Structures are given as structure tokens and as C-alpha cells.
Image: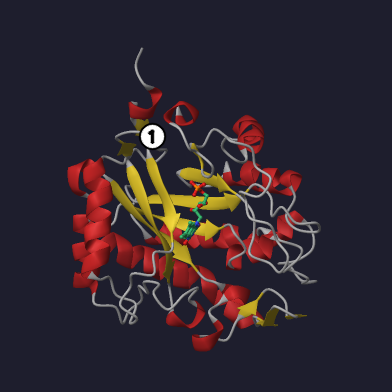
Amino acid sequence: MENPLFRPLELPNGVILKNRIAKSAMSDSLGDGTGHPTKAQNRLYRRWAEGGVGVSIIGEVQAQPGYAEKPGNLVLDDNADLDRFRTLARQGSVKGSNLWLQLGHAGALAYAPTSTPKGPSALDLPDLKCAALTDDEIRKIPAQFARTAKLAEHAGFGGVQIHAAHGFLLSQFLSPLFNKRCDDYGGPIANRMRLLLETIGAVRAAVGPGFVVAVKLNATDQLEGGLSEDDALAVVATLDQTKIDLIDISGSTYFPGAKAASDGAGGGPYFMNFAKRARKVTTKPLMLTGGFKTRAQAE
Ligand SMILES: Cc1cc2nc3c(=O)[nH]c(=O)nc-3n(C[C@H](O)[C@H](O)[C@H](O)COP(=O)(O)O)c2cc1C
């Protein structure tokens, strides 16, 4: 019988991934400190592509330097030397592999020594202090993500993944633990997903139809008072009505006292039950990330 892992996957925009094997987003800290790719990074992504992955995703690529998650993040803005990104895109796309940039904004979790952490709401916890973004700053975010997506397309990357997982900015908006707002961006889940939807709309409008726009979403924050599975499912159902090409399901959040996705997990993939529930509310391609240890599990 044909192995399902090696069956091509056609995305809604018509792009075909050559197989179902993905290297999920990882913040590799291999940027040169000015936000540009290094030779080590080019070599790493080339090697993944040579290894045969259908797609690999570079974690935490920032639309602006001010909210980086780590100093080694890539920053793709109007000041970037696009040729250096072109080299990375070319190296990481050999053998028909897709290379996507994950669009990040660390928000409340921005790297404090070089940033001023700001999230949906001000927080003053022993291990997490941040200010609240102003209304004006929030309104500018979709256009900032969109500009980086457009630059990524110009540089030759195949797509972007909008990062709305693991407690970074768009995930903070989804999570009642970070988002205490009383305006159109806070309260019920329909409001908490507003910035994500505005960002998807702006990104999709800025790039051509053949450029992939994916989203990474938490199935749950795995924290009392955080994003619940039912609310995450409402987000999936709404994403179904947008022009995104893939939903990458993962979970857990960086928050004081939070457990990691791997804590308490058995031997198998995490969030499988949620993925099965999500399958019922969307026809979008789903990617499930986390805990895969064997080929049999992946199949
Ligand atoms: C070193 C490291 C860096 C990571 N960086 C990111 C990141 O930048 N963006 C992201 O969405 N997830 C990031 N993750 C989470 C992974 O994408 C994935 O969700 C998690 O590792 C669980 O999958 P696994 O069990 O296959 O490792 C990172 C994980 C590791 C281990």
C-alpha cells in the first residue's frame, strides 16, 4: 500500500507539498544579531531540504526588531538586505522542498534586554512584566506582518506561517490570561481572535495567490484560565472561512508556572484528540505538531 507520508498534499491555493513530512517552526537563534541569516543557517535549512522534507518552517522571524523573542531571530523589514534572505530561501528550497518563514512578534514575552515587552494588557507578575500595547500600536500590527510576508515572497520563500501559538503576541490575544481588554479585542473569543483575523486578511492581500499563508494555533494553553479547547475550536471554525492554506495545531504556552506540551504526555503525539475535533469543523489541511517519535505514529 502507498505510504501516506509520501503522498503529495495540495493546499487550497494550489501549491503542492511533495510529501507530508514537515520540520516544524523552531527558533534556531542562528541569525547574526542584526536580523540577517548566517551561513550556518543556510547550511541547516539546505540540509533539511536535502533530507527530503516537504516543508520546513523557520521559527520566529520578526517584522520589526523591537519585539524579538531572542537576539538571534531573523528580522525581515524594509532595512533588511534582501539578498541575504534570497540565499537562505534558495538553499532551503532545494529538491522541491518548501521553505516558509514563521511570522513572529513576542509581545509580552519580547526579549527584555533588547526590547520593551508589551502585550494585549499590562501584567505585573513575579516572572512576567509587560506594558499594554496602545490602540494605535495594535492597529499597525497586521500591516507590519503583511509587509514582511511581501518581502518574504520577493526573497523567494514559498510562504509564511502566522504564529498564533505558544504564548506569543497573537496567542496572547487569544488567551484570557494575557488578554484582559474590554474593547473589541478582548472578552469573548470572537473578539480575542480579531487581531489574528485582521492579520490573516492583511497578509493574504499583500501576497500573490501562489504564496502560502498558514497559521500555527494552540489547541489549548494547558493552563487554568488560558485558551480552552472549545475556544480554540471556535477559532479553527472561523479560520475555515478565511483564505489560509494550512492550520498547524500545537499547544501550551510560555507563562509563569505553565507546563510544557510534553509534560504528562504519553508516548504518542500531543493534541491528537483536538486535531480530530478540528477535522470536523474545517476542510483546511491540518498539520499536527508535537510528540511524534516513530514513523508508525506519523503514518
Ligand atoms: C529549540 C526549539 C525551538 C522552538 N521554537 C519554536 C518557534 O520559534 N516557533 C514555534 O511555533 N514553535 C517553536 N518550537 C516548538 C516546536 O515547533 C514544536 O511545537 C514542539 O517542539 C513540539 O514538537 P516536537 O515534540 O516534535 O519537538 C520550538 C521547539 C524547540 C525544541
- 120 or 117: which is nearer to us? 117
Residue at 46%, 50% in the rendered image: 214
- Image location (x, y in percent) of residue 139: 58, 75
Instruction: Give the colour scheme shown.
Output: secondary structure
- 126 or 273: which is nearer to us? 126
Q: Is residue 156 visible in this depiction of the protein?
A: no
For label 1, being within 8 Å of ligand 1 is answered: no
- 131 or 280: which is nearer to us? 131
- Image location (x, y in percent) of residue 122: 73, 80
Residue at 53%, 62% in the rendered image: 199
Q: Using a 10 Å C-alpha cutoff, classify the residue at mark 1 as few (fewer than 14 neighbours), some (14 to 19) or many (20 or more).
A: some
Whether residue 235 sits left or right of residue 94 in the image: it is right
- State the residue position of label 1: 20
The number of numbered badges drawn on the structure is 1
Q: Amino acid at mark 1?
A: Arg
**25 over 297 or under it: above or below:** below
Residue at 28%, 49% in the rendered image: 48
**288 over 199 or under it: above or below:** above
Q: Is residue 139 visible in this depiction of the protein?
A: yes
**228 over 128 or under it: above or below:** above
Image-quadrant location for residue 10: top left
- Image location (x, y in percent) of residue 210: 32, 47
> What element does badge 1 sit on?
loop
Which of the image's four quarters has the N terminus?
Answer: top left
Which of the image's four quarters has the C terminus?
Answer: top left
Whether residue 16 sits left or right of residue 193 in the image: it is left
- Image location (x, y in percent) of residue 131: 68, 84
Image-quadrant location for residue 188: bottom right
